[in-house]
Amino acid sequence: MTDFWNIVVSGWQIILAILIVLTIAILLFQRRDPIKTIAWIAIILLIPIAGIILFYIFGRSHRRKKIFFRKELLDFRQIEKHISWQNKHLTHHIFQNDEALVSKAGVVKLLFSNSKALLTMHNNVEILNNGSETFPALFESIAKAKHHIHLEYYIIEEGSVGNQLKELLIKKAKEGVEIRIIYDDVGSWGLSKSFINELEAVGIEICAFLPVRFPRFAQRLNFRNHRKIVVVDGEIGYIGGLNIADRYLYGKPDIGIWRDTHLKITGNAVNSLQLIFLTDWYFATNKLISDDVFFPDIKIKQRCMVQIVTSGPDSDWNSIMQAYFYLITTAQRYIYISTPYFIPNESILTAIKTVSLSGVDVRIILPSKSDSKLTYYGSLSYLPELLEANVSIYSYKKGFTHSKVLVVDDIVSSVGTANMDLRSFDQNFEVNALIYNKEVALKLKASFLEDLKYCDKVILEEYLSKPFINHLAQGIARVFSPLL
């Protein structure tokens, strides 16, 4: 009997060794970020069984595979003429009336090349701070809808905000307004069947994005739709950091108020938001919608250039990360960044340190409390090298800052769903608005400076004097950063 069990144990050891070798081979074949590769190899070797399971759930890169079929923008006749025109004329002369913008023309061409993100010329952009400004504006727009309402959210939760939205949508559906909702199956895991049934009972179409079901559990769990998009009648669009949940309005007892930033857009950029929603709808339901009525000709005299950019595991390039990299490396005077989660790849980290050492004023606001302890400690692990490179780090004390905002040189700003972390860069479906407008940049800059009033500046010596256990926790979190 002893010999039998020895054979069994030896057999399992051989199988495990083969699995380790094969998994590491797959990891190396993906040719990903070397730091990330080393981290995964360390995890697999330290905790082989758990490490292998975690890798196949969280670590595999599908950017080169066809698990996600293309949601090609080129299939939509509404933008073919615009793509043709911009492909010919997307040069510095677009910014001929604003010399300051000429220095940022490259990012427009970059985003057109890597994601076919169209530059829209005429828009009105309203900045909405926190849920107290966002939800009233959003609900007012929905209440005035005449033809259709499209909503796409990572999180939809039942509660005061969720139920108010539900009742409003039911009312509009009874008035004959077409309503379609996409929710992420993991982010909205607590959404009850009764909530969904109430919406479907009045003709509202609602679907889960990449539902996590056996047997494709491992392939889908890690690739989530983190986008927040609302389009009303093809004329009004919303994009930013706020989901549908009570904490975005009331905060949470353990972390305080929820500081966030959203945008209300009217103008040509709404067509881009609509296009993204409808491609995601097609991806989730296999129903193609491309009628002209969803793409009205919007007349806005105000010149405010906006480019809506997406990224995700279905795309060839890390489009939003590349936009961040370009804006950081071309900054001349300042870069202001607000992000709830800071787990950068080596390229972004090096770019930030390099421009700071060159004399650019780099300021980053991070939360002092977080809804994710592991991510929080992982973010803190990057502080010493940033501080040594003269980057100014601020810890937000008034509550939890969830804004995803970047402002550069009073010229360009970015607001959207993408955090400055590996998950947003590589794994989530994200969407950001890049605004090439001084007035908007100055308003976002003013909001950033207002937030600084509720921050403590992080001092390197004080940080280093923290207890050993804190630094150990941060080091461990950094090792596991590929999972964050």
Image (cartoon, rainbow, N blue to C red):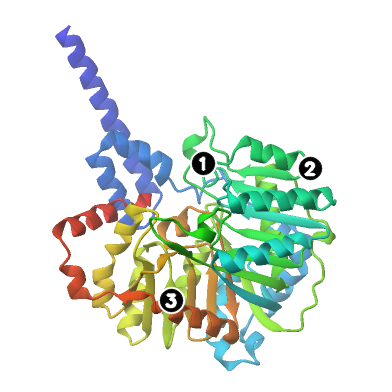
Q: Is residue 291 left or right of residue 283?
A: right
Is residue 84 visible in the rendered structure shown here? yes
Q: Nearer the viewer, mark 3 or mark 1?
A: 3
Marks 2 and 1, how far apart at CA: 28 Å
Q: Earlier along the polypeptide chain: callout 3 or callout 1?
A: 1
Q: Earlier along the polypeptide chain: callout 2 or callout 1?
A: 2
- Taking depth in this image into account, of 471 and 484 the one nearest to the observer is 471
- Residue position marked by numbered label 2 in the rendering: 203
Picture quadrant of residue 242: bottom right
Q: Nearer the viewer, mark 3 or mark 2?
A: 3
The relative height of residue 131 versus residue 120 in the rendered view (above or below) is: above
x then y, percent, for residue 8:
24, 16
Disc 1 secondary structure class: helix
What residue is shown at x 69% (from left), y 66% (from top)? Answer: 237
Q: Rate crowding at label 1 as few (under 14), some (14 to 19) or many (20 or more) other CA atoms within 10 Å.
A: many
Marks 3 and 2, how far apart at CA: 43 Å
Q: Residue furthest top?
A: 1
Marks 3 and 1, how far apart at CA: 37 Å
Q: Nearer the viewer, mark 2 or mark 1?
A: 2
Disc 3 secondary structure class: helix
Identity of the amino acid at label 1? Arg
Disc 2 secondary structure class: loop
Q: Rate crowding at label 2 as few (under 14), some (14 to 19) or many (20 or more) other CA atoms within 10 Å.
A: some
Identity of the amino acid at label 2? Gly
- Residue position marked by numbered label 3 in the rendering: 451
- Taking depth in this image into account, of 242 and 32 the one nearest to the observer is 242
x then y, percent, for residue 298:
79, 73
Identity of the amino acid at label 3? Asp
What residue is shown at x 41% (from left), y 58% (from top)? Answer: 422
Q: Earlier along the polypeptide chain: callout 3 or callout 2?
A: 2
- Residue position marked by numbered label 1 in the rendering: 220
